[in-house]
């Protein structure tokens, strides 16, 4: 008892720590193809962020034709962002999907397959196909090829990369690349020709997906779809996805501040941190609230995010950087129609707050 009394008081776990623990637990449970896809996306993201912000700065210094005047500072930024970083992120996605499946021997066929997807025109969809193809084929070769101990060192640096690179490359050129390119072209043409009604529908779907499981597989599917379209210079879905991912924590925080009798003392305290997580585009900040009352909270945040996504698409908002939350808004040209974009986020957060007022009952 004396030893127990001598221990320091346990630290109070705040919302940010809770969210971190929940994300780690969710990641630990992730297995199979979804895990491999998310590994590729996590390595790809820094490349996309750096490229998107470089393009935005190029537009800020050189205007809409920043890449045309060779030798200028704006041209150099466009070369860094659009010409290099955005050209790299498709191969990086494929490479690290393959790496997640087959470890280091999968990197080379993944990179080559991803680069072929980019040059063929099958984009991020082709990169996903190439990544899984390279990873599983390399893993198959590694399991099947048996060599004497003296020659084992040749497998990861010579035999596996060479055979898998040639096979994956040929399959991408002759088998998978052309049909995937056709699918991507049809999808790109549809997105570019969207009218107001179809833009609303797409915004509603993407927004609701972002709020449905708050960082889970459905959320990540919408996010990956939007990030992948950046390579095709389609920036509208990315704006809708990030805005819709910000509103669940923001709406919950506002509701907890305004309608105190509908939330516990812990939830009201956590609402302060939820604001920071919300403006930082960390949708997982809503998980502790949803875990306590899922049947009322989840439909409410889905409604607010669906409205946000629809408004973002209708307003014609576009986003060049796939992360950063509110902190990318001041960067010139990172967001098109930045005022309307902020309006969409505020309206969506307000809709979430009102929905929570009617769905949640006062706590006795």
Image (cartoon, rainbow, N blue to C red):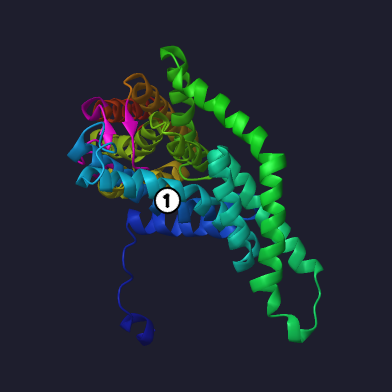
Q: Is residue 142 magenta?
A: no
Toward which corner of the image does residue 181 lie, by quadrant? top right
Relative to 207, is 135 above or below?
below
Q: Which residue is depicted at the point 49% across and 33% down?
A: 209
- Quadrant that contains the C terminus: top left
Labels in figure, total: 1
- Quadrant that contains the N terminus: bottom left
Q: Is residue 313 left or right of residue 339?
A: right
Looking at the picture, tell me which residue is in the foreground, 100 or 87: 87
Name of the residue lying farthest toward the front: 70
Relative to 251, is 189 above or below?
above
Looking at the picture, tell me which residue is in the foreground, 25 or 261: 25
Q: Position of residue 71 (x, y in %)?
A: 23, 46
Q: Which residue is depicted at the point 34% across and 55% down?
A: 16
Relative to 246, is 42 above or below?
below
Toward which corner of the image does residue 301 lie, by quadrant? top left
Q: Is residue 125 left or right of residue 281?
A: right
Q: Residues within 10 Å of mark 1 (few under 14, many from 20)?
A: some
Q: Which residue is mark 1?
A: 45
* Magenta region, residue range: 317-340
Q: Which residue is depicted at the point 31% across and 63% down?
A: 12
Q: Secondary structure at mark 1?
A: helix
Q: Is residue 335 magenta?
A: yes
């Amino acid at each position: 008892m004396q030893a127990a009394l001598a221990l320091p008081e346990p630290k109070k776990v705040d919302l940010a720590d809770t969210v971190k623990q929940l994300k780690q637990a969710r990641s630990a449970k992730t297995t199979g193809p979804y895990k491999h896809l998310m590994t590729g996306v996590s390595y790809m993201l820094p490349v996309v962020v750096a490229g998107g912000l470089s393009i935005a700065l190029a537009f800020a210094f050189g205007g809409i034709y920043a890449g045309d005047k060779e030798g200028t500072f704006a041209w150099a930024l466009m070369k860094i962002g659009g010409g290099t970083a955005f050209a790299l992120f498709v191969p990086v996605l494929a490479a690290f999907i393959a790496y997640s499946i087959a470890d280091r021997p999968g990197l080379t066929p993944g990179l080559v397959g991803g680069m072929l997807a980019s040059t063929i025109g099958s984009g991020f969809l082709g990169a996903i196909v190439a990544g899984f193809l390279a990873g599983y084929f390399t893993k198959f070769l590694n399991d099947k090829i048996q060599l004497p101990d003296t020659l084992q060192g040749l497998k990861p640096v010579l035999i596996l990369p060479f055979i898998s690179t040639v096979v994956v490359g040929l399959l991408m050129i002759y088998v998978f690349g052309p049909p995937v390119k056709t699918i991507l072209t049809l999808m790109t043409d549809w997105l570019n020709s969207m009218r107001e009604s179809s833009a609303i529908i797409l915004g509603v779907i993407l927004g609701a997906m972002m709020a449905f499981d708050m960082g889970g597989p459905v959320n990540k599917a919408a996010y990956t779809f939007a990030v992948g379209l950046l390579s095709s210079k389609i920036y509208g879905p990315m704006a809708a996805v990030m805005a819709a991912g910000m509103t669940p924590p923001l709406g919950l925080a506002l509701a907890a501040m305004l309608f105190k009798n509908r939330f516990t003392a812990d939830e009201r305290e956590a609402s302060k941190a939820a604001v920071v997580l919300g403006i930082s585009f960390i949708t997982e900040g809503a998980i502790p609230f949803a875990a306590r009352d899922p049947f009322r909270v989840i439909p409410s945040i889905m409604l607010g995010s669906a409205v946000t996504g629809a408004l973002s698409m209708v307003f014609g908002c576009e986003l060049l950087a796939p992360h950063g939350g509110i902190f990318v808004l001041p960067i010139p040209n990172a967001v098109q129609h930045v005022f309307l974009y902020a309006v969409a986020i505020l309206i969506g957060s307000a809709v979430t707050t009102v929905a929570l007022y009617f769905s949640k009952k006062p706590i006795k």
